[in-house]
Every structure is written in structure tokens, then in C-alpha cells.
Image (cartoon, grey):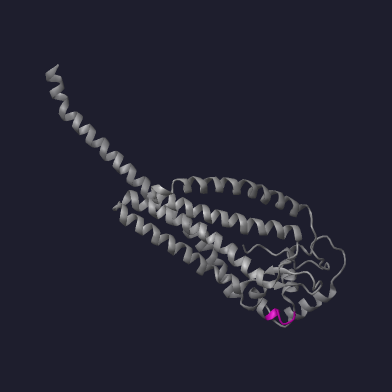
Amino acid sequence: MMRATLVSSAVSDSTLLHEDYETRLNDTVSEGLSTPTTAAMNFTVVEFYILSTFPSSTALPKTPTFELAYLIRIITLSTILALSVPLNFIVLWTVWRQRRRKSRVNLLVLHLTVADLLITFVNISTDVIWFCTVAWLAGNTMCKLIMFTQTFAMYASSFVLIVISIDRYAAIVHPLSVREADRRCKIMLRVAWTSAAVCSIPQLVVHELMSPDFNPTFYQCVDYGFKTKYFKLWWMYHIFVTLIMYVVPLATIFACYSAIVCKICRRTKARSTINWTSTAKTFPAIILKC
């Protein structure tokens, strides 16, 4: 999801001078165009990205090709894929065999396993194929749909973890009847999956198929076009994704399990105090009997 475009490696190991890019960059700076949005009037998206990322580079960009770094990523992701599929299916089969128990924990594990399998088959598989082909070959429609699905899977996994944490917190710190707890759990799961879909909708707008001027036939699924047109909005969206996908789930999980630990510690301390008091009261009687 939202991985950096492979075009960023297009400036490596080249000795040919690219005077046209540098001349237009100087003209742009001299005109006072200091933001990517205004600079886009003189530069294409990919050209501006290359020059702004590597301002000292005067080398002519070249089309990325398959290299050792891609091979390492393919091997790593393929190993994760080979381990994730059978292990998640084992969990799925175990939960399915115990479906008659109608356990709330089994329901939560089932949803988390489905989200993990979605990440495995969509996120990891498409990334492996992308690294193999280097260029994006699936077209603009699939670019938007796959980026939407990848983001949806990531959100779903994070939100289900939040639901699990809240459910455990409520069950231990604020216990309810089983019927009320089951109803609450199902509502939270519906909200989690719906929220994941809603939060992923911007991917249909942000990502698009683009190619650099130096190779119009080399396409990538990137978000630099949106970044160039709406720079502030692009940064706000990335901050939103970071907060909702990582910071909020981590903070929620930490808060819930911290509260659980505190509750357990208080109960243990209270029981220890009660046991010591009971022992102190019965000790004289025991001595008299002896």
C-alpha cells in the first residue's frame, strides 16, 4: 500500500548529462516557483520528483530494470506468503470446526484471520508480481482497485485488532451478560469492516497510472500526480493514514491491555488482603485448639 514508486531509482548509475532538466529547474527557481504545485507548470510530475529528490544530480534518468534489490524483496515476500497461507488456513479450519460453540473469541479470531488472508493474497501477492515486472502492467482501473483493496485489508486488520482489545477490556473490566457482550462484539465488527472500506475510498482518487517523459511506455501506479496538484491535501491524507492505521490502533491496544493489567493487579491485591485478614482472625482459635 502506497509504496514508493520505482521511478525513484531511475537516477542511479548514469553518466549522461541532462542539461534540459537543469535549465528548466533554474528557470523555475528564478521565477519564484517554490512549491511543487506551481513548479508543475514547467515540469512533468516524474521530472519534478526526480529533480526535487536529487537536486545535485545532473544525470539523465533511465528506466528501472530488474536488479538484485528486487530479487531480495521477491524472495522475502514469497517466504512470508508461503508461511502465511498454510498457517492462516490452519487457524481458519480450527475455528470452523468449533463453530457450534458460538464463542465470541472464535468469532474475533475468524475475522482477524480473514483480514490477514486478504493481506496475504492481495498485498503480498501483487507486490511480488509488481517487483517481477518492475513496471505496472495492469492498467489504470486495476491500479486504483488494487490500491483500494490493499489499503482496505490493512485497515481491516488494524480495526479488528482494536475490536479484540476493546472486547477483552470490556469483558474483564466492565463485564456484561453474554448476550449483551455478543451483540456488542458483532456491532463493533460491522463498524470495523465498514470503516475500513470508507477510509480506503481516497485511494481510488489518489493513485493513477503515470509514465515519465523520458520513457512514455513505462507505466507505474503512483500518487505523485495527486501530490503535485494538491500538495497540502496529499500530506494531510498521508498523516491521516499513519494515524488511523498505526498510531490509533497501537494507542488503543496499549490503553486497553494496560487497564486490564491494572484491574487484575487490583483484584489480586484485594484477594491477598482478604486472605491475610481471614488468616489473622482464625489464628488465635487455631492456637487455642492446639
**Is residue 35 something that shows in the picture?**
no
Number of disc labels: 0
* Residue at image point 79% right, 63% down: 64
* Residue 170 appears left or right of 126: left
What range of the chain is rendered magenta?
38-42
Quarter of the picture holding the C terminus? top left
Q: Residue furthest top?
A: 290
* Residue at image point 51% right, 57% down: 157
**Is residue 38 something that shows in the picture?**
yes
**Foreground: 123 or 236?**
123
Q: Position of residue 274 (x, y in %)?
A: 22, 36
Quarter of the picture holding the N terminus? bottom right
**Foreground: 229 or 84?**
84
Task: Give the dominant element type of the magenta stretch: helix, strand or loop.
Answer: loop
Q: Position of residue 44 (x, y in %)?
A: 74, 77
* Residue 126 appears left or right of 98: right
* Residue at image point 48% right, 52% down: 110
Residue 74 on the magenta segment: no
**Foreground: 146 or 67?**
146
In which image quadrant can residue 287 be found?
A: top left
